[in-house]
Amino acid sequence: MAQQAQGARTDCYAAVDIGASSGRVVVGYLEEGLIRLQEVHRFDNRQVRRDGHDCWDLDLLSSELLRGLARCKEAGFAPKTVGIDTWGVDFVLLDADDNLVGDAVAYRDGRTAGMYAVADAIMAPEELYRHCGLQRQPFNTIYQLLALQREHPEQLEAADTFLMIPDYLNFLLTGQKAVEYTNASTTGLLNAETGAWDETVMAAFAIPRRLFPNVTHAGASLGPVLPEVAEAIGYEPRVVLPATHDTGSAYLAVPACEPPAVFLSSGTWSLLGVENRSPICAEPAYRANFTNEGGYHFRYRFLKNIMGLWMIQSIRRELNGITYVVDEKAIRKGRLHQYMRVEGLGHEVDFPDLIKAADEAEAAGVIASIVNVNDDRFLAPDSMIEEICAACDEAGQPVPETLGELMLCVYESLARCYRDAVDELASLAGHGYASINIVGGGCRDDHLNRRTAQVCGLPVYAGPVEGTALGNLAVQMLADGVFPHLKAVRAAIAESFEVTKVEP
């Protein structure tokens, strides 16, 4: 058993929050009635190319997980519990000896191309929605498993256990196998009404039920970390399941100002919706392509997945030379040099530079072209810039010729998509909404907040920024009795962190 760090603070909790591009370890504790946070470790997450597929680097994630927990001790903390959240849909398979079977293929990989047709021939999509209530997206776990059946059936034969990414990391810490509810709800294999694996769907799609541990809910303890883990990090915390799907955690941290409120978790994806006590799997919800994802304590996140800041992140990476596919057509049109003018900044392009470019274009009276941000063409293009320009060209709209015009196109398209989703929500709910509450990194984007308020005609409450880590910590604190119920946690979050109001 590891020695607790001498003098280390133990009345604290560690949130391991891993997104598609980076991860961090945040320690949280209560001080004079306010929740305090300290980030102790941040690391890059990356995909690697293996056997023709984009895969997650699980060795990197596991080593950074241990490094981050060890740095808690270095920072003077010995957290009582640890919770891990990540993105949804992706998974690993383990054999009978708990060795990995195959790779953890990433959701943006192209292996699911054509799987809609395969799935629809087995079960009509509206019937699948009635069972699982999940928004139709090409990367849903059910389509990934269909692709695996066709490419590597031997992997499913050799497998003994299915775990999602946070479940696997929890297994490495504790040796315990548990699939947590909120992440399981992103698979397309969970019954929306019962919260259990839908055996009718599994049987229809020939997905072996034997691989899937029964669903476990947020707040459950998996017990202490393994002795070798305790030795490596210098203390012996218990592992508690938060809402392991990052959006599930983020929704927990929404203070819900000016109800009835729409929630928007703003990051790589924009997850816009509301919190319900029961799923909505009726025909109108299916047609609007809303999803019923699991939330903390049997709540449902009724929301729409919108492409979000992925488009902006991709543009930034291209301009910094990480990825740029030169299109001869673009050069002939004289556009490419316009974008590369940003090199004159004398530093790497960062998000404030992109926001400034949009602000300047707006001030100059530029009328933005509009694209469908949810079009699959924007999921993983070789060049996001050229894909946006091509979409404008094909629609007969002005093609952006400067960085400001490009950014204005993205911002205006996102804001209009948010407005359409809010209108659909109001129609499905039978009532309007009084505000939009934005949490996550995207709430720092003043241009997007302002355009969202103006286009939607609703006040926007932006903050807290640390939504996902806060929601993760909230469940740990609830499990430890620090707060009596969720309402008390949300009140403490509202008191502890700045929320900015943006009027329409």
Image (cartoon, grey):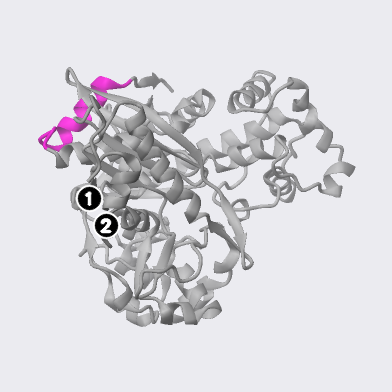
Q: Is residue 147 visible?
A: yes
Circle 1 is placed at which residue position?
218
Q: Position of residue 54 (x, y in %)?
A: 59, 59
Residue 414 vs residue 335: left or right?
Answer: left
- Rendered position, 127 above or below 135: below
Q: Which residues are magenta?
A: 481-497
Amino acid type at mark 2: Tyr
Quarter of the rendering occupied by the C terminus: top left
Amino acid type at mark 1: Ala
Circle 2 is placed at which residue position?
181
**Residue at the spot 40% in from the left edge and 45% down from the top edge:** 65
**Residue at the spot 41% in from the left edge and 34% down from the top edge:** 440
Labelled disc at residue 303: none
Q: Is 484 included in the stretch rendered in magenta?
A: yes
Locate residue 486: give its quadrant. top left
Q: Position of residue 144 (x, y in %)?
A: 48, 68
Q: Is 449 included in the stretch rendered in magenta?
A: no
Q: Is residue 464 visible?
A: no
Q: Nearer the viewer, residue 324 or 378?
A: 324
Q: Position of residue 445 (x, y in %)?
A: 50, 27
